[in-house]
Amino acid sequence: MPSELKLLLLKELGLGVDGNGYITKSGNQVLDPYIEQPVNVENMAIFPGSTIVLDDNPLSLASYIEEYGEV
Amino acid sequence: MGVSPDPVESAAHGATAAAIDWTEEKIRDLVKQFLNRKLAFIKDEENIDLVKAERKSTEFTILSQFVPKTYIIQVQMGLALREIATDQNRVIPLVDKIRRKYGRDGLHIAEITQVGITYQLLTHLSQLYRDPPEVTKRLTYFLGHAEDLVIFVRSTDKPNAIVTKIIVRIEAAETHIIILFGSGYAQGVVDKVLTQLDGEAPGEYVIERWREGVQIIAFIFSSELRGNISHWSDSLSTDEKSVKH
């Protein structure tokens, strides 16, 4: 997916990207809810039906699936 | 990807649109699909494929019927560590994340699952107790005390010290089981420990060994379980496993 499209999609979700490539919301870095660390646009995952921004590491992905079901 | 201080706004104004092969209509369609919950947003599918495959595995399917929610992610991460074990670039950051999230105890649960101990323990508990709620109760206790009940033996450990640990801990543990794990040269230390334990307290413990590749896993059951064990130990002795009374 082209970077520009990714950024447009983020904008539709009310999200942005800061100068270091981290996802932001209202100017603040968005934290992965499972590892509580900022999410970089290069490692970002958002699943259908969700606005939760995840880091695409196995722990966060498994935790998300455990909580919300298969993606 | 080059990221400007305000890349979203820049892209939204079409500053770089000419450089890509995406029509406005196609972009609008994808945005619509995404907002309608039909499109996922993930760059590298390696990890999601790994997680999905594990969840479908026989081992995880069986474990998830008995492992409580509290420990299920640690267990699944153990299976992930096993799968990616040869790729240190993936193992190191995952170990770091497990430790940060669940602490040393949580990482220990992942590690014992990685080397196959959790699954073998479940097999034993199922044979010992039969009743699923009781199996879950015992497994939960064990995972909550894995730091004490699973001893990772090192090649430099003194057998005497390990034997003392076993005797003290096995009587204090509700499950009356201690597990030893040794890999590489540590296998020899595990063998010495088991010989010494059997010599110091003949008939007091039931010991069962599994060897696989360069690792050994030994289950030590205290006398409290003797009644439960006697009916199935005979069948185990016909396998590659070694059973002592």
Image (cartoon, rainbow, N blue to C red):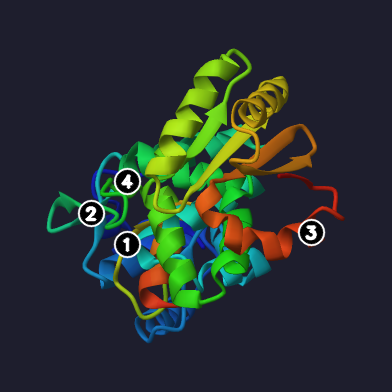
- Evaluate whether label 3 is on the same chain as label 2: no
Labels 2 and 4 within one chain: no
* C-beta proximity under 8 Å, tags 3 and 4: no
Q: Position of residue B182 (x, y in %)?
A: 65, 30
**Residue closest to the eye, B53 or B223:** B223
Marks 4 and 1: same chain? no
Whether label 2 touches label 1, CB < 8 Å: yes
- Residue bearing mark 4: B101
As measured in the structure, the alpha-carbon distance from the residue carrying label 2 to the one carrying label 1 is 7 Å
Secondary element at tag 3: helix
Residue sitting at 59 percent across and 18 percent down?
A: B159
Please tell me whether mark 3 or mark 4 is closer to you in this view.
Answer: 3
Amino acid carrying mark 2 in the image: Val
Number of labels in the image equals 4
The residue labelled by disc 1 is A53
Amino acid carrying label 3: it is: Asp
- What residue does disc 3 label? B234
Q: CA distance from mark 4 to mark 1?
A: 18 Å
| Amino acid marked by disc 4 | Lys
Q: Secondary structure at mark 4?
A: helix
The CA distance from mark 2 to mark 4 is 18 Å
Tell me if label 3 and label 2 are in contact, CB under 8 Å: no
Rate crowding at label 4 as few (under 14), some (14 to 19) or many (20 or more) other CA atoms within 10 Å: some
* C-alpha distance separating marks 3 and 2: 58 Å
Q: Which residue is mark 2?
A: A30
Query: Dot 1 surroundings within 10 Å: few (below 14), some, or many (20 or more)?
Result: many
Which residue shows up at 46% across the image and 47% down it?
A: B109
Where residue B81 sits: x, y (%)? 57, 45
The picture places residue B18, in percent across and down from the top left corner, at: 47, 61
Q: Quadrant of the N terminus of chain B?
A: top left
